[in-house]
Amino acid sequence: MLPVLALALLAQTPRPQDAPPGLVLHAGGRTRIGLEVEALEKLLRADPESDKYAGPLSAETPQHEVAVDDFFLMTTEVTHEQYAAFLRATQRRAPYTWASAAIDAGRRAYVAEQERARAEALAAGRPVPDALPFDPVEWWAENWSGQASAVPAGDERRPVVFVDYADASAYARWAGLRLMTEFEYQRAVRGDTDRKYPWGDAWDSEKYAATSLLAKKGGAWPVGSFAAGASRQGLFDLAGNVWEWTASPYVAYPGYQLKVYEFGYGAKTRQVNAVAAWSPFQRVVVGGSFQNGNLMARATTRRAAEQAFHSEALGFRCAADPEPGVDLALAILADELTSNARPLEGETPIAFDAQATVAAQHWQVAARGEGLLQNYAVIEEHRYALFTPVEQLPCTDIVNFERQCFERLAATGRPLVLGFLSTNMSFVEPPLEPGTYFVGYRPSGPRKASPSEGPRTLEELLGLDPDSAWIVLSSLDGKPLRAWRTRLEWAPSRDGRAQLIDPSDAPRTNEPPTTERTLRFELSLATRTSKKGLAFALVLRSEGSALAGTWRLTR
């Protein structure tokens, strides 16, 4: 029989079958990150041409260890057909290479307009304006709305390129995923070793990766074209093909030192100033591309890119946290609930615990065609609902908590915030549209009205019975929207979980039976008492088949 501790550890380990579609599980661990200074010196000495890369190469030093958590990672770079599903769903701008017909028409119109302007100037005796070149990228950026675009024929399974950091991040969030970090990338390539490439240290210019050393020159290859170059977990093109965005800022590793290297002797001595140009606003890109040799395809290669940069040799792949909803919660906190958009606790913005998020996620994927790689999937839709609690409620018992709730109501007219709820679905019970909301609590009992409430109190606005306790949903600007009766319990702390309850399993009540699934969040909020928390449930019911199918749930 397994010891109790071993059973607990097994219960916490993410299971491969919980992976989002198209991603595989990578076990974390202590990982060797970067390059030894001596190895950098060897690279610079061996190749005088590497002098021009000395600064970026020095950014890989010094080698150090980082504890990388478990993570899921896409088996391939995001392809044109995967990105096309995102564009169909969001109506976002396509890469300019998808719009050759529209751009050709724009070019003809541009040339005609310039000719007209020149003719008018000549006829009027004015100076003839200089002919300015047509910029297809700039034209598409200004004129894309309403124009036709489509994946170029034959590029369906090539990595999508000409996407900047915002484009890549937007796809990841739409798909319920995120961009990988550079540490996760190096973990995926190296594992517990310090190998150079996903397959080891050997190099064959025709066998392992799409680089500039291939005899057959060209652009990016269809993903998975180099089976021998796959990683131990079956990931393709981690080396070569196209550079890949990461979420990591371009900053120095701990212990980085400026250094000037000196090679040769006498009159042939050359000095190499290896200084990296750090910028926390730039992002690290990794893996090299078809435009570079194997020097850029090493595990430790890190280059800087402006977030607005895009090119024919830069794409991305997505990652995910082992726990459902965590990536989405972090994105919401970064994009919507920035510190100046959160309610205050005293003079400090409320802190939320993204790692304690309770969530349900569902993906709809396209039917598999012939000849697809294993674990390759085209996501067509992602549905989710999540609750992220505050880091800690400032109370030591239920009486203290309710007193603070009434104090908050008296001071601000707003309920004490327990967390936030976010979903891209509609629910009928309680009535809820897609969006992000603050979840607050109004205890039972009379209370003093707040001067800030004006002529109508919270109870009047929502029709609340003061003799009941209420969960109150508010917009992000603090406006109370709706409420439903609830009961909070002072109970032993536990992890939250999500459940999908089929109609046949629903508890019997006096209400008419439902014919749809119900989503139930069982929640426990941390307090100043480590072993006790405030427990309650959020129950959401949708109409039709919105909750049908297989869901990834916080367990």
Image (spheres, rainbow, N blue to C red):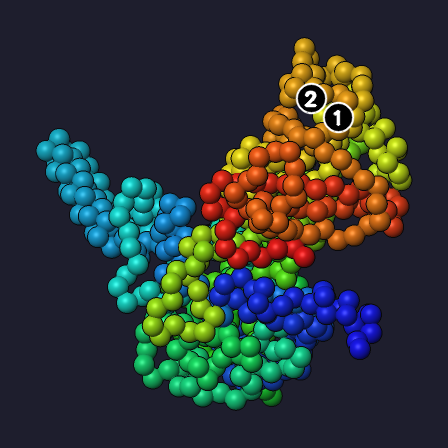
Residue at image position (79%, 52%) is 494
Front residue of this view, candidates 256 and 413: 413
Label 2 residue SS: loop
Please identify the quarter of the rendering in which residue 241 is found. bottom left
Circle on res. 464: 2
Front residue of this view, candidates 53 and 204: 204
**Residue 328 location in percent, x, y?**
59, 50
Q: In which quarter of the image is the N terminus?
A: bottom right
Q: Residues within 10 Å of mark 1 (few under 14, many from 20)?
A: some
> Disc 1, disc 2: CB below 8 Å?
yes
Q: In this view, does 310 lie to the left or right of 186?
A: left
Label 1 residue SS: loop
Circle on res. 468: 1
Furthest-top residue in this view: 455
**Residue 472 location in percent, x, y?**
68, 30
**Residue 239 location in percent, x, y?**
49, 75
Distance from Cα at disc 1 to Cα at disc 2: 8 Å
Front residue of this view, candidates 158 and 532: 532
Where 75 sits versus 359, above or below?
below
Q: What residue type is labelled 1?
A: Ser
Residue at image position (56%, 85%) is 200
Q: Is residue 33 left or right of residue 148?
A: right
Residue at image position (29%, 41%) is 146
Q: Is residue 97 left or right of residue 15?
A: left
Furthest-left residue in this view: 123
Front residue of this view, candidates 385 and 265: 385
Q: Is residue 103 left or right of residue 168?
A: left
Residue at image position (89%, 38%) is 397
Q: What residue type is labelled 2?
A: Leu
